[in-house]
Amino acid sequence: MIIGSVLEADTHEKRTFLNPDTVKKFIQLGFNIIIENNFGKFLNIKDDFFKNLGVNCITRNEVLKMSDILLKINCPSLDEISKLKENSILIGNFFPHLNKEVINKLINKKVKIFSLELLPRITRAQSMDILSSQANIAGYKAVIDSVSEFNKAVPMMMTAAGTVTPAKFFIIGAGVAGLQAIATAKRLGGIVSATDVRLASKEQVESLGGKFVFVEGKQNFETAGGYAKEVEEDYKKKQEELLKKTLALQDIVICTALVPGKKAPRIINEEMLSLMKRGSIIFDLAVEQGGNCIYSETGKIVEKFGVKILGYKNVPSRISETASNLLSRNIYNFISSIYDKGTKLVNIDENDEIIKSIYIKDVLN
């Protein structure tokens, strides 16, 4: 079987699903690997390096036409779909209900679609979980980029001229990205606090050295799958009052709050912004899902009330080499789990919990 992969047309997308380590493993399993010319340009790898591993570097169109399994970060274009083989397998990150037209065209062409962002939160799927691997990168990079924009030192410094006080970080949302942001901010010497609507996250925040800030009460807005869910109006009012006081004391705020399948909750309003210190930073990791801050704009840095609001697109792609290495391991773990070494064929068991969650086989209405 042939596994192929191409670069993404989106200029903000610099990640890939294949790196040299996973290429070697796929070849050992018996796959042939084909990639688009100059595939490794964002990994600092030349075509000759891949060729020496046994990879064929060919044109984009040839990859699309020849691949039995095509690895693609994002949804293919309509032109790309026209070139895909019938009964081929497409694996990536497709958000099907946001891309119904594309998904339906793929299904009509008998392409088997696996959308990995839909993986269930079970132990067996952890090594394939692209959302978690990329959220880790995003949480780290959000802190690094925020510190770069911040006009002060982060750690406490004792000098002959006096003491430099440490920067204060506040993390909104203590999922994978938020926890990595806490860990990174602590490593840089910041004073860190965090909030989340899921009470279970309190122990995780505190284990990383952060202070957990929460609305008093017994509410726990957590789904059975471990994700945050929408909060009640009474809770929102209490949360708003708590955030007004907390945000006014912060230097850097990292927003990571998301509700699966819905727009990101709007958490930081205009009044809260107006109370923040001039020169402080907000990094909104939820900007592409609508944003946690009222003035966040995708792909832009906005300044309001002297506060910089960073809304970078595709944050993991800003560290494309590391992000790609993690994605490559995710994709290898998934494909190897459905590949039969004896027959050298992919076995799609539709009763398997993982396959049921990510296999898009019916036309979407």
Image (spheres, grey):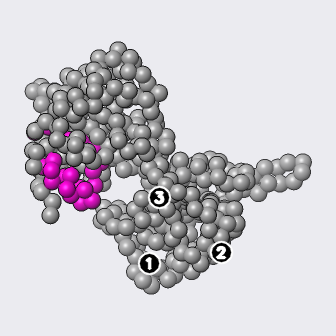
Q: Residue 308: within the magenta? A: no
Residue holding disc 1 = 218
Quadrant in which residue 76 is drawn: top left
Residue 242 visible, this orientation:
no
Q: Neighbour class for label 3 at 10 Å: few (<14), some, many (≥20)?
A: many
Quadrant in which residue 231 is drawn: bottom left
Per the rendering, the mark at residue 275 is 2
Mark 1 or mark 2, earlier in chain: 1
User: What residue type is disc 3 on?
Assistant: Thr
Residue contact at pointers 2 and 3, CB within 8 angstroms: no
Q: Neighbour class for label 1 at 10 Å: few (<14), some, many (≥20)?
A: few
Q: Is residue 41 above or below residue 235?
A: above
Residue holding disc 3 = 298
Callout 1: helix, strand or loop? loop
Real-space CA distance between mark 2 and mark 3, rounded to the nearest whole angstrom: 23 Å
Quick one: which residue is furthest to the right in this view?
160
Q: Neighbour class for label 2 at 10 Å: few (<14), some, many (≥20)?
A: some
